[in-house]
Amino acid sequence: MVMTHPDKRREQVRLSQPGSLSLSLYPSPLSASPGERSVKYLRMGCFGFLKIMMFIFNGIIFVAGGAILGVGVWVKVDSGSLLGFLTQIENAPSELNQLLNVGYLLIAVGAVLMVIGFLGCCGAMKESKCMLLLFFIIVLIIFIAEVAGAIVILVFQPLAAQLIDALGKQVVDSIKTKYGSNQDLTGVLDTTMEGLKCCGFYNYTDFTDSPFNMRNQSYPSTCCQGPPCSEQQANQLNITGCYSRVVELIEENAVVLGAVALGIAALEIAAMAVSMSLYCKIGK
């Protein structure tokens, strides 16, 4: 008599039961080799890591977009801002009219960043291929626009210099006719000079024959590092003009600005790569 091993008998009974044959033909995950399980867990870990990084990165973008949106709203509401100063300049170049829309530009940029952050976060956490693809397309469009904008700035540098020269002449004319009599222009210019530690647009002579100079026979305190400020003291100290001061600040921080620009470009490329990686892995 042939004896049957108990395990074999149980297997025969299990196979003889209806519906059990189809289940027994599929290998259990535990039946995979250690190497296959390691590869599987590694892929799951990489996928989870990409999701977390995508969520954190786009969370930062969302918060930054909200901050920029808030600044844009503040610029539009604040009547004492630099934009208010520009409206006081008579016969200003027509190109400066576009600067009056900076608030709207900031609002639009902030809104777009918030949308990008939302799509990235939700697309990663909910594993939505549609959201991830839309995120990739928007970031790609922004990246192309930034590259095109940089090329345009490099090509039209002479035009920008001409615009600044024309602006400088009109600003000086406005200072000579309104500084000391127009509260908006006077307040904004005083705040700018105190913040930048500068005097006038070019130098102290911008205030010569202005209402303030004619009434007080002196110059703003920022042109002499404190009142009273006579013409002789202003001439001796010769405080740098605000235009030259801004140029100096840009030149001093050119490396930082360049590094920030490159960092933003690198983040955008990384975001596109991660979003496309998640897009390809979802559903597999």
Image (tube, helix red, strand yellow):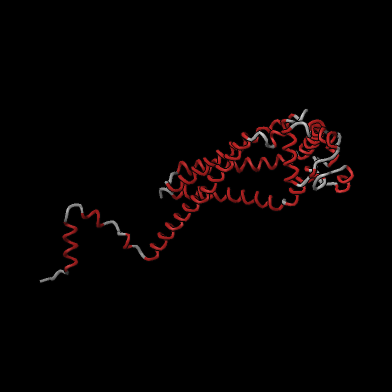
* Residue 273 screen position, x and y as percent: 54, 50
Residue at position x 65%, y 43% in the image: 147
Give the camera-side residue of 212 and 96: 212
Residue at position x 13%, y 71% in the image: 3
Asked whether, in this view, residue 30 is left or right of residue 183, the answer is: left
Asked whether, in this view, residue 122 is left or right of residue 209, the answer is: left
Residue 49 appearing in the image: yes
Give the camera-side residue of 1 and 133: 133
* Residue 80 screen position, x and y as percent: 68, 35
* Residue 58 screen position, x and y as percent: 52, 47
Asked whether, in this view, residue 284 is left or right of residue 248, the answer is: left
Give the camera-side residue of 240 and 106: 240
Farthest left residue in view:
1
Residue 92 appearing in the image: no
Farthest right residue in view:
232
Give the camera-side residue of 159 and 20: 159
Residue at position x 19%, y 58% in the image: 15
Asked whether, in this view, residue 176 is left or right of residue 81, the answer is: right
Q: Is residue 280 shown above or below 96?
A: below
Q: Is residue 157 shown above or below 266?
A: above
State the quadrant of the N terminus: bottom left
Q: Is residue 57 shown above or below 87?
A: below
Residue at position x 40%, y 59% in the image: 40
* Residue 209 screen position, x and y as percent: 86, 34
